[in-house]
Image (tube, rainbow, N blue to C red):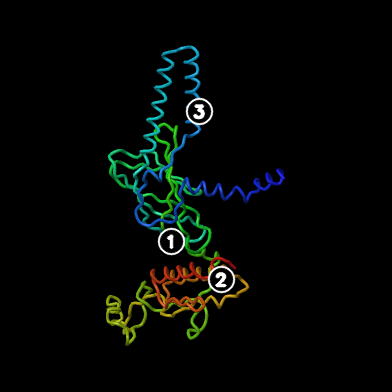
Amino acid sequence: MDEVGTASLNEPGIGKPLRTRLRNWIFQPRGAESGSVVLNQRRVFIFPTRYGFFFAFSLLLFLAASINYDLALGFVLTFYLASAALVAMLHTFRNQVHLHLTPLKSEPVFAGEQAGFDVLIENPRDDERAALWLKAPGFATPVDVAPRSRVLASVRVPAPVRGLQPAPRITIDTRYPLGLFRAWSYWQPALDCVVYPAPAMVPGEIAQLPEAGGEGVPRGRGTDDFAGLREYQVNDSPRHIAWKAAARSFATSAPLPAKDFSGTAAAEVIFDIDNHSPLAGLEARVSMLTRQVLDADALRLRYTLKLGARSVGPGEGEAHRLACLKALALHEPLPGRA
Protein backbone atom coordinates (compact mmCIF):
# COMPACT_ATOMS: atom_id res chain seq x y z
CA MET A 1 0.00 0.00 0.00
CA ASP A 2 2.81 2.40 0.87
CA GLU A 3 4.59 1.57 -2.37
CA VAL A 4 1.44 2.31 -4.37
CA GLY A 5 0.93 5.60 -2.56
CA THR A 6 4.54 6.63 -3.08
CA ALA A 7 4.39 5.80 -6.78
CA SER A 8 1.22 7.82 -7.26
CA LEU A 9 2.79 10.89 -5.61
CA ASN A 10 5.84 10.62 -7.85
CA GLU A 11 3.80 10.69 -11.05
CA PRO A 12 4.50 13.78 -13.19
CA GLY A 13 0.85 14.83 -13.27
CA ILE A 14 0.56 14.98 -9.46
CA GLY A 15 3.30 17.44 -8.53
CA LYS A 16 3.21 19.59 -11.65
CA PRO A 17 0.01 21.51 -10.83
CA LEU A 18 1.39 22.30 -7.38
CA ARG A 19 4.64 23.59 -8.87
CA THR A 20 2.70 25.60 -11.42
CA ARG A 21 0.47 27.16 -8.77
CA LEU A 22 3.49 27.95 -6.62
CA ARG A 23 5.32 29.57 -9.54
CA ASN A 24 2.24 31.57 -10.52
CA TRP A 25 1.77 32.71 -6.93
CA ILE A 26 5.37 33.91 -6.67
CA PHE A 27 5.88 35.49 -10.11
CA GLN A 28 2.27 36.53 -10.79
CA PRO A 29 2.33 36.04 -14.58
CA ARG A 30 0.36 38.62 -16.57
CA GLY A 31 -0.88 38.68 -20.12
CA ALA A 32 -0.16 41.33 -22.73
CA GLU A 33 -0.34 44.79 -21.18
CA SER A 34 -1.22 47.90 -23.16
CA GLY A 35 -0.28 51.39 -22.14
CA SER A 36 2.47 52.43 -19.75
CA VAL A 37 3.52 49.97 -17.04
CA VAL A 38 5.27 50.91 -13.78
CA LEU A 39 7.62 48.40 -12.18
CA ASN A 40 6.47 48.69 -8.59
CA GLN A 41 7.84 46.70 -5.65
CA ARG A 42 5.52 43.75 -6.27
CA ARG A 43 6.80 43.30 -9.83
CA VAL A 44 10.53 43.32 -9.07
CA PHE A 45 12.12 40.09 -7.81
CA ILE A 46 15.59 39.81 -6.31
CA PHE A 47 17.79 36.83 -5.51
CA PRO A 48 21.52 36.26 -4.87
CA THR A 49 23.65 35.27 -7.82
CA ARG A 50 26.19 32.44 -7.59
CA TYR A 51 28.79 35.05 -6.73
CA GLY A 52 26.46 36.27 -3.99
CA PHE A 53 26.21 32.76 -2.54
CA PHE A 54 30.00 32.41 -2.71
CA PHE A 55 30.34 35.79 -0.98
CA ALA A 56 27.93 34.69 1.79
CA PHE A 57 29.84 31.43 2.25
CA SER A 58 33.07 33.41 2.56
CA LEU A 59 31.51 35.62 5.22
CA LEU A 60 30.54 32.54 7.21
CA LEU A 61 34.14 31.33 7.07
CA PHE A 62 35.38 34.75 8.21
CA LEU A 63 32.87 34.73 11.06
CA ALA A 64 33.81 31.20 12.16
CA ALA A 65 37.52 32.05 12.08
CA SER A 66 36.94 35.26 14.04
CA ILE A 67 34.97 33.40 16.70
CA ASN A 68 37.48 30.55 16.88
CA TYR A 69 40.55 32.76 17.19
CA ASP A 70 38.82 35.70 18.91
CA LEU A 71 39.91 38.17 16.21
CA ALA A 72 38.44 41.61 16.78
CA LEU A 73 39.57 42.86 13.36
CA GLY A 74 38.07 39.72 11.83
CA PHE A 75 34.66 40.65 13.28
CA VAL A 76 35.06 44.19 11.93
CA LEU A 77 35.91 42.92 8.44
CA THR A 78 33.09 40.36 8.45
CA PHE A 79 30.36 42.78 9.50
CA TYR A 80 31.73 45.50 7.24
CA LEU A 81 31.53 43.20 4.21
CA ALA A 82 28.07 42.00 5.26
CA SER A 83 26.80 45.58 5.52
CA ALA A 84 28.31 46.36 2.09
CA ALA A 85 26.42 43.38 0.64
CA LEU A 86 23.15 44.61 2.16
CA VAL A 87 23.69 48.07 0.70
CA ALA A 88 24.46 46.48 -2.69
CA MET A 89 21.21 44.52 -2.47
CA LEU A 90 19.29 47.76 -1.87
CA HIS A 91 20.96 49.46 -4.86
CA THR A 92 20.26 46.46 -7.09
CA PHE A 93 16.58 46.64 -6.22
CA ARG A 94 16.41 50.44 -6.61
CA ASN A 95 18.15 50.25 -9.96
CA GLN A 96 15.01 48.71 -11.47
CA VAL A 97 12.00 49.64 -9.34
CA HIS A 98 9.71 52.48 -10.53
CA LEU A 99 10.82 52.29 -14.15
CA HIS A 100 8.08 53.20 -16.66
CA LEU A 101 7.71 50.90 -19.68
CA THR A 102 5.60 51.82 -22.72
CA PRO A 103 5.02 49.76 -25.89
CA LEU A 104 5.38 51.84 -29.07
CA LYS A 105 5.22 50.09 -32.46
CA SER A 106 6.35 47.19 -34.57
CA GLU A 107 7.22 47.43 -38.26
CA PRO A 108 6.09 44.63 -40.61
CA VAL A 109 8.74 42.14 -41.76
CA PHE A 110 8.92 39.16 -44.08
CA ALA A 111 8.94 35.61 -42.77
CA GLY A 112 12.48 34.50 -42.00
CA GLU A 113 13.54 37.97 -40.83
CA GLN A 114 13.60 39.39 -37.31
CA ALA A 115 10.54 41.09 -35.87
CA GLY A 116 11.34 44.28 -33.99
CA PHE A 117 9.24 45.60 -31.10
CA ASP A 118 10.00 49.19 -30.05
CA VAL A 119 9.54 50.01 -26.37
CA LEU A 120 10.14 53.18 -24.37
CA ILE A 121 11.92 53.04 -20.99
CA GLU A 122 11.51 56.10 -18.76
CA ASN A 123 13.41 56.91 -15.58
CA PRO A 124 11.44 59.39 -13.43
CA ARG A 125 14.03 59.57 -10.63
CA ASP A 126 17.18 61.66 -10.17
CA ASP A 127 19.58 58.69 -10.11
CA GLU A 128 20.87 56.84 -13.15
CA ARG A 129 19.65 53.35 -13.99
CA ALA A 130 22.80 51.59 -15.17
CA ALA A 131 23.54 48.13 -16.55
CA LEU A 132 19.96 47.13 -17.31
CA TRP A 133 19.37 44.25 -19.72
CA LEU A 134 16.33 43.62 -21.89
CA LYS A 135 16.04 39.90 -22.61
CA ALA A 136 13.77 37.79 -24.79
CA PRO A 137 14.20 34.27 -26.23
CA GLY A 138 17.41 34.46 -28.26
CA PHE A 139 17.86 38.21 -27.61
CA ALA A 140 19.61 40.42 -25.05
CA THR A 141 20.64 44.07 -25.18
CA PRO A 142 22.11 46.42 -22.51
CA VAL A 143 20.30 49.66 -21.62
CA ASP A 144 21.40 52.64 -19.53
CA VAL A 145 18.83 55.30 -18.60
CA ALA A 146 20.06 58.70 -17.45
CA PRO A 147 18.25 60.57 -14.63
CA ARG A 148 14.81 61.86 -15.67
CA SER A 149 15.19 60.75 -19.26
CA ARG A 150 13.81 58.25 -21.75
CA VAL A 151 15.46 55.58 -23.85
CA LEU A 152 14.05 53.91 -26.94
CA ALA A 153 14.92 50.21 -27.18
CA SER A 154 14.05 47.59 -29.79
CA VAL A 155 13.56 43.94 -28.92
CA ARG A 156 14.23 41.71 -31.93
CA VAL A 157 13.17 38.09 -32.16
CA PRO A 158 12.95 35.66 -35.09
CA ALA A 159 9.78 35.71 -37.20
CA PRO A 160 9.75 32.27 -38.85
CA VAL A 161 6.16 32.16 -40.20
CA ARG A 162 3.66 34.61 -41.65
CA GLY A 163 0.77 36.06 -39.67
CA LEU A 164 0.46 38.18 -36.54
CA GLN A 165 3.35 37.56 -34.17
CA PRO A 166 2.78 38.87 -30.62
CA ALA A 167 5.59 40.47 -28.70
CA PRO A 168 7.51 38.02 -26.50
CA ARG A 169 7.64 38.23 -22.74
CA ILE A 170 10.50 40.61 -21.96
CA THR A 171 12.71 40.18 -18.90
CA ILE A 172 14.24 43.35 -17.44
CA ASP A 173 17.38 42.20 -15.64
CA THR A 174 20.10 43.91 -13.62
CA ARG A 175 23.03 42.90 -11.41
CA TYR A 176 24.20 46.42 -10.67
CA PRO A 177 26.35 47.42 -8.80
CA LEU A 178 28.43 44.48 -7.49
CA GLY A 179 26.88 41.45 -9.17
CA LEU A 180 26.03 39.82 -5.84
CA PHE A 181 22.26 40.04 -6.45
CA ARG A 182 20.06 39.78 -9.50
CA ALA A 183 16.87 41.83 -9.75
CA TRP A 184 14.43 41.10 -12.55
CA SER A 185 10.85 41.63 -13.64
CA TYR A 186 8.63 40.38 -16.47
CA TRP A 187 6.66 42.39 -19.00
CA GLN A 188 4.78 41.40 -22.13
CA PRO A 189 3.84 44.49 -24.17
CA ALA A 190 0.61 44.46 -26.16
CA LEU A 191 2.29 44.64 -29.55
CA ASP A 192 1.75 42.55 -32.66
CA CYS A 193 4.08 42.36 -35.64
CA VAL A 194 2.62 41.66 -39.09
CA VAL A 195 4.84 39.03 -40.70
CA TYR A 196 4.48 39.01 -44.48
CA PRO A 197 4.92 35.72 -46.35
CA ALA A 198 8.41 35.08 -47.68
CA PRO A 199 8.33 35.77 -51.44
CA ALA A 200 9.08 32.90 -53.79
CA MET A 201 12.72 32.76 -54.83
CA VAL A 202 11.82 32.45 -58.54
CA PRO A 203 10.00 35.54 -59.84
CA GLY A 204 6.42 34.67 -60.74
CA GLU A 205 4.76 35.43 -64.07
CA ILE A 206 2.61 38.54 -64.16
CA ALA A 207 -0.84 37.26 -65.15
CA GLN A 208 -2.82 39.73 -67.29
CA LEU A 209 -6.50 40.41 -66.99
CA PRO A 210 -8.52 38.21 -69.36
CA GLU A 211 -9.48 41.12 -71.58
CA ALA A 212 -5.89 42.30 -71.90
CA GLY A 213 -4.76 39.06 -73.53
CA GLY A 214 -1.28 37.64 -73.78
CA GLU A 215 1.37 37.29 -71.11
CA GLY A 216 4.23 39.35 -69.89
CA VAL A 217 4.39 43.03 -68.91
CA PRO A 218 3.68 45.45 -71.72
CA ARG A 219 5.65 48.64 -72.01
CA GLY A 220 3.89 51.63 -73.51
CA ARG A 221 4.10 55.30 -74.07
CA GLY A 222 4.22 57.34 -70.89
CA THR A 223 5.85 60.40 -69.34
CA ASP A 224 8.56 58.84 -67.20
CA ASP A 225 11.82 58.58 -69.17
CA PHE A 226 12.96 60.28 -72.40
CA ALA A 227 13.31 57.57 -75.06
CA GLY A 228 14.24 59.62 -78.16
CA LEU A 229 12.53 61.44 -81.03
CA ARG A 230 9.63 60.34 -83.21
CA GLU A 231 7.30 61.82 -85.78
CA TYR A 232 4.80 64.32 -84.42
CA GLN A 233 1.21 63.06 -84.21
CA VAL A 234 -1.91 65.21 -84.40
CA ASN A 235 -3.03 64.27 -80.87
CA ASP A 236 0.39 65.02 -79.31
CA SER A 237 0.74 67.88 -76.86
CA PRO A 238 2.64 70.95 -78.21
CA ARG A 239 4.88 70.67 -75.14
CA HIS A 240 6.31 67.43 -76.57
CA ILE A 241 7.56 69.08 -79.76
CA ALA A 242 11.37 69.07 -79.99
CA TRP A 243 11.75 72.72 -81.03
CA LYS A 244 15.52 72.61 -81.42
CA ALA A 245 15.32 69.71 -83.84
CA ALA A 246 12.27 71.27 -85.51
CA ALA A 247 14.46 74.05 -86.94
CA ARG A 248 16.42 71.49 -88.95
CA SER A 249 13.23 69.73 -90.06
CA PHE A 250 11.88 72.99 -91.47
CA ALA A 251 15.02 73.39 -93.59
CA THR A 252 14.89 69.84 -94.94
CA SER A 253 11.08 69.58 -95.15
CA ALA A 254 11.23 66.59 -92.79
CA PRO A 255 8.30 65.67 -90.53
CA LEU A 256 8.00 67.66 -87.33
CA PRO A 257 9.87 65.80 -84.52
CA ALA A 258 8.38 65.17 -81.11
CA LYS A 259 9.88 63.87 -77.87
CA ASP A 260 9.08 60.24 -77.03
CA PHE A 261 8.81 59.08 -73.43
CA SER A 262 8.73 55.50 -72.19
CA GLY A 263 6.76 54.22 -69.23
CA THR A 264 4.56 51.43 -68.06
CA ALA A 265 1.38 50.81 -69.94
CA ALA A 266 -1.92 51.29 -68.24
CA ALA A 267 -2.77 47.57 -68.39
CA GLU A 268 -4.10 46.06 -65.19
CA VAL A 269 -3.24 42.62 -63.86
CA ILE A 270 -5.02 40.31 -61.48
CA PHE A 271 -3.54 37.81 -59.04
CA ASP A 272 -5.90 35.06 -57.94
CA ILE A 273 -4.89 32.36 -55.48
CA ASP A 274 -7.26 29.95 -57.25
CA ASN A 275 -5.21 30.28 -60.45
CA HIS A 276 -2.32 28.46 -58.78
CA SER A 277 -2.40 24.68 -58.48
CA PRO A 278 -3.73 23.50 -55.09
CA LEU A 279 -1.19 20.68 -55.29
CA ALA A 280 1.53 23.24 -54.56
CA GLY A 281 0.13 23.81 -51.06
CA LEU A 282 -1.32 26.91 -49.49
CA GLU A 283 1.98 28.38 -48.29
CA ALA A 284 3.62 27.89 -51.70
CA ARG A 285 0.71 29.67 -53.43
CA VAL A 286 0.79 32.53 -50.91
CA SER A 287 4.55 32.82 -51.40
CA MET A 288 4.14 33.00 -55.18
CA LEU A 289 1.44 35.67 -54.88
CA THR A 290 3.76 37.67 -52.62
CA ARG A 291 6.44 37.55 -55.29
CA GLN A 292 3.95 38.64 -57.96
CA VAL A 293 2.73 41.57 -55.85
CA LEU A 294 6.31 42.76 -55.29
CA ASP A 295 7.15 42.41 -59.00
CA ALA A 296 4.02 44.25 -60.07
CA ASP A 297 4.74 47.08 -57.62
CA ALA A 298 8.32 47.36 -58.90
CA LEU A 299 6.93 47.70 -62.45
CA ARG A 300 4.37 50.27 -61.26
CA LEU A 301 1.43 48.25 -62.52
CA ARG A 302 -2.17 48.55 -61.44
CA TYR A 303 -3.26 45.20 -60.04
CA THR A 304 -5.88 43.34 -58.01
CA LEU A 305 -5.33 40.58 -55.46
CA LYS A 306 -8.00 37.91 -55.00
CA LEU A 307 -7.92 35.54 -52.04
CA GLY A 308 -11.03 33.43 -52.36
CA ALA A 309 -14.02 35.64 -51.57
CA ARG A 310 -11.81 38.55 -50.56
CA SER A 311 -10.50 41.03 -53.11
CA VAL A 312 -7.97 43.83 -52.61
CA GLY A 313 -7.85 46.49 -55.28
CA PRO A 314 -7.50 47.35 -58.02
CA GLY A 315 -4.83 49.81 -57.06
CA GLU A 316 -1.17 50.71 -57.22
CA GLY A 317 1.54 52.35 -55.17
CA GLU A 318 2.96 51.72 -51.71
CA ALA A 319 -0.33 51.80 -49.79
CA HIS A 320 -1.88 49.20 -52.11
CA ARG A 321 1.24 47.01 -51.92
CA LEU A 322 1.17 47.05 -48.11
CA ALA A 323 -2.54 46.25 -48.06
CA CYS A 324 -1.99 43.25 -50.36
CA LEU A 325 0.95 41.98 -48.32
CA LYS A 326 -1.05 42.27 -45.09
CA ALA A 327 -3.95 40.38 -46.67
CA LEU A 328 -1.55 37.63 -47.71
CA ALA A 329 0.00 37.53 -44.22
CA LEU A 330 -3.40 37.07 -42.56
CA HIS A 331 -4.93 34.77 -45.15
CA GLU A 332 -6.54 31.76 -43.49
CA PRO A 333 -6.04 29.02 -42.55
CA LEU A 334 -3.00 29.99 -40.49
CA PRO A 335 -3.00 27.30 -37.75
CA GLY A 336 -3.07 24.27 -40.04
CA ARG A 337 -0.54 25.32 -42.60
CA ALA A 338 -0.82 23.44 -45.87
For disc 1, the marked residue is: 108
Position of 39 relative to 177 (above/below):
below
Estimate the x, y position of residue 216 in percent, counting from the top left. 51, 77
Please tell me the numbered disc located at residue 285.
Answer: 2
**Residue appearing at x 54%, y 67% in the figure:** 334
Nearer to us in this view, 307 or 207: 307
Pick out the residue farthest to the bottom: 234
Number of other residues with Cα within 10 Å of mark 3, as a class: few under 14, some 14 to 19, many 20 or more: few
Q: Amino acid at mark 2?
A: Arg
Of the numbered discs 3 and 2, the one sitting upstream in the chain is 3
Q: Secondary structure at mark 2?
A: helix
**Residue appearing at x 68%, y 44% in the figure:** 6
Please tell me the numbered disc located at residue 54.
Answer: 3
Q: Quadrant of residue 221?
A: bottom left
Position of 58 relative to 15 (above/below):
above
Estimate the x, y position of residue 303 in percent, counting from the top left. 44, 76
| Mark closer to the observer (1, 3) | 3
